[in-house]
Amino acid sequence: MNPTEVRLEARLGAIEYMIGQLFKSVYSITGATPEMIERSHQALRDYLRVMSIPMDDPAISDLSAGELQDAYEHLLGIIAEAARDMKK
């Protein structure tokens, strides 16, 4: 990995961490329960499974939708981990 790639990975990791912490704060402020959090995450997963991305090439559209779904799933894992650490 070259220095630019390392820097970009570090920035992406920092953004992902911040997203997790922001959701943790929002969930805490709103009094969200673990069940509410899981329901909202599952609703997003359900939507992403059937979502399409309008493009001229259906194969690229499917690939893009799959990559987006994978990226969201990764973020949902980070958010869920942060939410588990919420103070009761």
Image (cartoon, grey):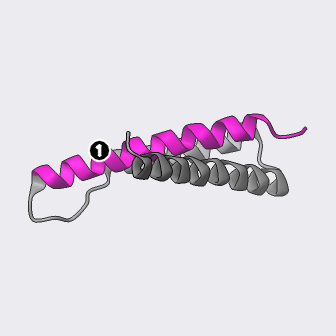
Q: Examine the rendering and report whether any part of residue 46 can be seen.
A: no
Which residue is rendered at x = 69% and y = 53% of the image? Answer: 23
Out of 87 and 32, give the one closest to the viewer.
87
Image quarter of the N terminus: top left
> Does 62 appear in magenta?
yes
Q: Is 33 on the left-hand or right-hand side of 11?
A: right
The magenta segment is: 59-88
Crowding at dot 1, Cα within 10 Å, few <14 / some 14-19 / many 20+, comes out as some
The quarter of the displayed image where residue 85 is located: top right
Q: Where is residue 6 in the image (x, y as percent from the top left)?
A: 46, 45
Q: Is 70 on the left-hand or right-hand side of 78?
A: left
Disc 1 target residue: 66
Furthest-right residue in view? Answer: 88
Q: Which amino acid does label 1 sit on?
A: Gly
Look at the numbered disc 1 and give the secondary structure of its residue: helix
Which residue is rendered at x = 60% and y = 40% of the image? Answer: 78
